[in-house]
Amino acid sequence: MSCGRFIPQRGLTSNVNTNASNTDAVNNSSTNFDSGKYSELLARKKEFIQMTPPVKIDPKAVIKGKVIVVSQGLESSTDDSMLSRGLADYRLAKSIDELETIIQVVCSKGGQVAVYKGKDDRKATGFTSNCKVSIIDYKTPAVIAQKNFSNSKPPEVIRSIEPDAKDEYLMPRPLADIIRYIDSFKVDKEIRSDYPLSAKELLRVPLQVSIDPAPVIKGKVMFAQRVEYGNINPFNPTTTDYSDLGVNYGFGYEKLATRSSDVTTLVNIVCAKGSQIGKVGNVTEFSSKCEISLVDYKTMTVFAQKTIENKNLEQGAPKESFPTDWVVKQPKDEITAYLQGLPVS
């Protein structure tokens, strides 16, 4: 139900802190999809969200096998598919038999941080949004990694509240930060799906490093990249782009692989928020810092690595009326020049 335009009443905020190598591959077993088994898996999501297994934190925790993402307390407009957007489709479990890892996200109401007043004198009380993310080894079972996220920074204006919120406004859940945390986990073994390959899977595979002083791009090439660009506030998860097919950096079609059996050289490109480079009005601009890794796909070994950073202010960045962090575009031309400057065979 819309409540109109709410303005925070000064002096009514509370003191709340702001906190906001294994190279073996496994086959993709989801090729024979069983709708009955998938329905059985989905029917147990409530059970999975209520799980409280022992906490046995592993500093080297990885995502094992197939995964399901479950959540509670997100905005009504958000579903579990948003949280799993950084996972390849063939990494997601389709039956209880193949499930090995549960990613559990539980969000709840915290303390009061603001009171908003509408034009008709109707009031809405603003509360902190707290979220706990747990990576659960389902087979053990145990929580092997866990992190808390919080948003206690009230916006200047709210325009609506949840239909059943009883004049309460829960701060936006920090979805982007949660997804970045999920994206940070490697997998124990690559799941190789002959077609299509997914950057989301390739960027999670554990790699060895053995730098070659004279690197050569051999055979057919596959690109996998994850790029952050634009408004990177903690609540906007759509600023991260995952790309694989269609990315070529100047290489012709005949040099590009589309199936895992064709790949000799994997090129991983990860571009993320770098250092602050300037400020235009309310927009603080940050560099795009990209790490390029050339990988021998057969052994999953990095044989060349380079960091390239775009520190040029983006003149086309939007002029916002509120403080905004903005990551400039990736240095695509410089990345292309680097890759095209390497010998090929």
Image (cartoon, grey):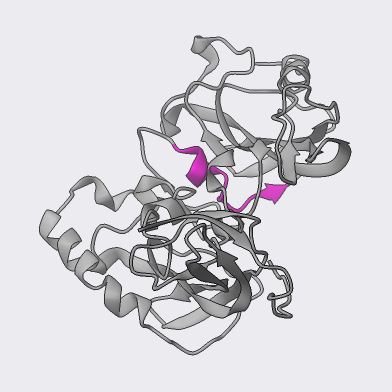
Q: Which image quadrant: the C terminus?
A: top right
Residue 209, percent across and down? Answer: 73, 47
- Asked if 109 appears above or below 332 in the picture, the reply is below
Range drawn in magenta: 198-209
Q: Position of residue 51 (x, y in %)?
A: 38, 83
Q: Is residue 214 magenta?
A: no
Residue 47 picture quarter: bottom left
Q: Is residue 189 left or right of residue 337?
A: left
Q: Is residue 207 magenta?
A: yes
Give the camera-side residue of 213 and 34. Answer: 34
In the rendered image, is residue 27 in sight?
no
Q: Please, is residue 122 above or below residue 233 in the view? A: below
Residue at x 55% of width, y 52% of height = 23
**Residue 125 position within the rendered picture, expressed as x and y whole percent measured from the top left:** 54, 73
Of all residues shown, which one is farthest toward the front?
A: 120
Residue positioned 53% across, 42% down in the render: 238
